């Protein structure tokens, strides 16, 4: 048996599937395959097919035409592909998380005959048919045997087990009032909008009068304890209690100790006349009270599970699955604090021109496609998605949880993002002729990290000079003509890792202090690229020393050997050098280029 826990928008649904293929999606059931429908607009009509292949393994097939599936193991199941995984596993589609577990039946192997007989007796006590009283407290007398007590406690445990899973425990509890205690009718009542409402009854049959005594419930709620009444005192009430000998009510409390409901039991006159009790005895009252406590505990667990689910979904919108679990254990990590972080900004190059060729829906779908790819890369390298803004995204590393290699992780994520764009281009080749490319800026430094949203809307992020500079460096990719730029601060943290070249010292808008910017080319470069990068950096040193002739001499071979694929950075630097050869700069020239746009 496979158990699914589906969480979307704070709502928790639990589904069990006995065998064969099972599908998840926003659309209707098809091909007679069982399905759970998810009302998440980011979930495809047919998104996932799941089938058990071994006792503890399942095959996950991505049916979506445009969305991948992310697992809590950081594995990505791309469009049209499948993976065999070990249970339990949690997968993420759109804004929905689906936890998949294997539910095995209890194994009785190794039990002796006496233990099996006791187990059988316990199970039969839980499933007594209506009209039977075997195993009820009515049969036990005032001194129940150990065996009968075992059956009694097993019934209580069964109610508690159902309480931890779903609202079915209301019906289980109403049935226990009859089968366990020996009353003739059991009710579970909850207070809704100031009124007592029946949530479950056993036997589940209609009655032509009020099912409960308002005066008994009123006294119970006022005194906040179990209350039972019978005989003449009950018959003197104005409410209709024809044929009833006694009633009992025990309060259900919420986690704030407020009375939110009641377990209510009734004993008819016919039962009282033939049985050993004429009313409700203290032992029976204690058991009803235990049932009420079980319901209260079950409601509290349900609320905690729902809150944990909402919190987990909220975390997983921003954090990787591993980090989300860590934050759930230790929410104090989210409190505002100063931390050294690495920040990444990215947006789609030439997006305005691309969007002119698409209708509004297609434009949104393209952005969603690119954002999904970039988000997947960020989370694959343990980054935090801070914000989406139009066609752009902001991410960060080393907060809220520490990461010793945060700059390296950010650079690997950036390279992966650029590598994903050709696949996006291929998917959209029939819609757009312009290339789908991204520009990425990365910076490292101190920032204030925490909730940058409000009390009403949570948004984890960072504020400060480090963040502003990262955003400006992303804008500089347009000027330099390269997909990824990193600051000198980030470069220092990389050591000898990655192939980079220093492109320029720049001064960006709103920040007076100049900063070195480097092109991030790859994790490992070819000998040819490294040789050309060394030549460029030599030319840059000549340029910054006002040696414009030697700078042009170094740059010329780079431009002459491009075969039409000119390096924008080399062209730009040579143009500056030639300009200063024709018209020498002021004596205050320091080689810093002022960028006039964001």
Image (cartoon, grey):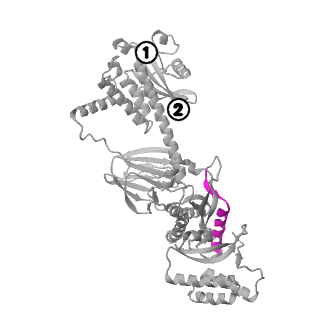
Q: Does the magenta stretch include residue 492?
A: no
Count residues near mark 1 (Cα–Cα under 10 Å), then give few for <14, some for 14-19, many for 20+.
many
- Residue at (51% x, 15% y) in the render: 239
Q: What stretch of residues is rendered in magenta?
A: 458-478
Secondary structure under badge 1?
Answer: strand
- Residue at (51% x, 29% y) in the render: 253
Pointer 1 and pointer 2: residues touching (CB < 8 Å)?
Answer: no
Where in the figure is residue 569, as x and y percent of width and height?
62, 80
Secondary structure under badge 2?
Answer: loop
Q: Residue 244 carries which label?
A: 1
Q: Does the magenta stretch include residue 469?
A: yes
What residue would you read off at disc 2? 254
* Disc number lying in front (1 or 2): 2
For residue 335, side relative to residue 586 (left or right): left
Query: From where the camera sits, is residue 128 visible?
Result: no
Q: Is residue 228 above or below residue 100?
A: above
Circle count: 2
């Amino acid at each position: 048996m496979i158990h699914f826990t589906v969480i979307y928008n704070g709502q928790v649904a639990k589904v069990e599937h006995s065998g064969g293929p099972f599908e998840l999606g926003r659309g209707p059931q098809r091909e007679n395959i069982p399905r759970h429908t998810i009302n998440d607009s980011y979930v495809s009509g047919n998104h996932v097919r799941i089938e058990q292949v071994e006792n503890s393994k399942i095959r996950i097939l991505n049916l979506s035409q445009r969305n991948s599936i992310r697992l809590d193991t950081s594995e990505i199941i791309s469009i049209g592909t499948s993976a065999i995984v070990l249970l339990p596993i949690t997968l993420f589609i759109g804004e929905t998380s689906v936890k998949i577990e294997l539910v095995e039946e209890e194994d009785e192997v190794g039990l002796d005959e006496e233990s099996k007989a006791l187990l059988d007796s316990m199970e039969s006590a839980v499933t007594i048919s209506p009209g039977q009283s075997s195993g009820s407290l009515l049969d036990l007398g005032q001194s129940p045997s150990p065996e009968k007590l075992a059956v009694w406690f097993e019934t209580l445990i069964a109610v508690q087990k159902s309480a931890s899973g779903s609202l079915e425990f209301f019906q289980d509890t109403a049935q226990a009032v009859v089968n366990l205690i020996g009353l003739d009718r059991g009710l579970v009542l909850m207070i809704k909008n100031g009124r007592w409402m029946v949530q479950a009854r056993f036997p589940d049959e209609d009655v032509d009068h009020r099912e409960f005594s308002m005066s008994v419930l009123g006294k119970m709620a006022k005194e906040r304890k179990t209350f039972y009444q019978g005989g003449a005192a009950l018959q003197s009430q104005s409410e209709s209690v024809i044929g009833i000998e006694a009633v009992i009510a025990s309060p259900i409390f919420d986690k704030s100790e407020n009375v939110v409901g009641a377990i209510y039991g009734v004993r008819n006159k016919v039962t009282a006349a033939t049985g050993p009790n004429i009313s409700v005895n203290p032992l029976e009252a204690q058991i009803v009270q235990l049932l009420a406590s079980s319901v209260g505990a079950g409601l509290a667990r349900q609320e905690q599970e729902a809150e944990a689910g909402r919190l987990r979904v909220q975390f997983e919108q921003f954090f990787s699955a591993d980090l989300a679990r860590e934050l759930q254990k230790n929410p104090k990590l989210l409190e505002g604090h100063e931390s050294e972080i690495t920040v990444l900004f990215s947006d789609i190059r030439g997006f305005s021109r691309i969007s002119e060729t698409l209708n509004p829906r297609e434009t949104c779908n393209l952005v969603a496609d690119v954002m999904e790819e970039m988000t997947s890369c960020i989370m694959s390298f343990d980054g935090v998605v801070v914000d989406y803004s139009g066609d752009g995204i902001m991410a960060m590393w080393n907060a809220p949880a520490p990461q010793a290699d945060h700059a390296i992780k950010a650079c690997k994520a950036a390279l992966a993002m650029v590598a994903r764009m050709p696949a996006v281009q291929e998917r959209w080749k029939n819609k757009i002729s312009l290339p789908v490319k991204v520009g990425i800026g990365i910076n490292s430094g101190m920032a204030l990290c925490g909730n940058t949203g409000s009390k009403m809307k949570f948004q984890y992020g960072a504020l400060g000079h480090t963040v502003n500079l990262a955003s400006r460096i992303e804008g500089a990719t347009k000027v330099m003509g390269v997909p990824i730029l990193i600051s000198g601060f980030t470069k220092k943290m990389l050591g000898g890792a990655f192939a980079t070249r220093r492109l320029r010292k720049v001064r960006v808008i709103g920040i007076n202090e100049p900063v070195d910017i480097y092109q991030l080319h790859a994790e490992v470069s070819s000998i040819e690229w490294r040789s050309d990068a060394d030549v460029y950096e030599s030319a840059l040193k000549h340029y910054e020393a006002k040696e414009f002739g030697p700078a042009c001499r170094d740059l010329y071979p780079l431009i002459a050997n491009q075969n039409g694929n000119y390096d924008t950075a080399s062209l730009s630097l040579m143009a500056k050098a030639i300009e200063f050869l024709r018209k020498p700069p002021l004596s205050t020239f320091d080689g810093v280029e002022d960028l006039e746009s964001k």
